[in-house]
Amino acid sequence: MITFKQFLEKPVEAVAMGYNPSIIDTMALICSFISRNNAKEVLMLWVSLASTPLKHLPRDLLVAVFNTFLFASFPFFFWLYAILLHWQLKPMAEEMKEVMRKIEEDLNT
């Protein structure tokens, strides 16, 4: 039997092994992604721009802006991210099962 904790650690594997997540489970999973470390990482992206070579500045600036947007939008849109993830979990699990089946067939031949 697959537990909620196992789902939080490896969601695709848990669904592939038979765990049936509810939308609340996927919301909890999405909320577990964000932490104080994420805030530090976003801040460090902006701090590191000062030492970025001019050649890489547009790319790094784009990355910093995108990550800041994701971090800032999280409290407002986490439910949307959870719905999108919930919608994608089953196809991802089916794909994983198919790959594992092919690997098993290759090993048996």
Image (cartoon, grey):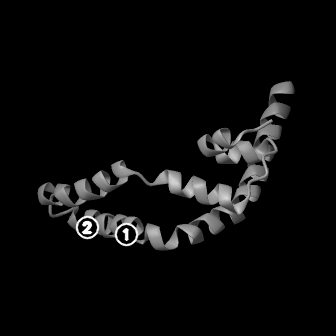
Instruction: Report the residue at 31% width, 70% height from top.
Output: 65
Query: Hey, which quadrant is residue 107 in on the image?
Result: top right
26 with respect to 21 (left or right): left
Number of other residues with Cα within 10 Å of mark 1, as a class: few under 14, some 14 to 19, many 20 or more: few
> Looking at the picture, how far across and down is residue 87, in whole percent?
71, 65
* Sooner in the amino-acid sequence: mark 2 or mark 1: 2
Count of marks placed on residues: 2
Residue at position x 64%, y 67% from top?
Answer: 84
Rendered residue at 79%/52% (across/down): 20
Looking at the rendered image, the disc whose residue lies closer to the viewer, 2 or 1, is 1
Q: Looking at the image, which is closer to me, 33 or 94?
A: 33
For numbered disc 2, what is the local secondary structure?
helix
Q: Is residue 104 above or below residue 19?
A: above
Q: Which mark is residue 72?
A: 1
Q: Which residue is mark 2?
A: 61
Q: Quadrant of residue 68?
A: bottom left
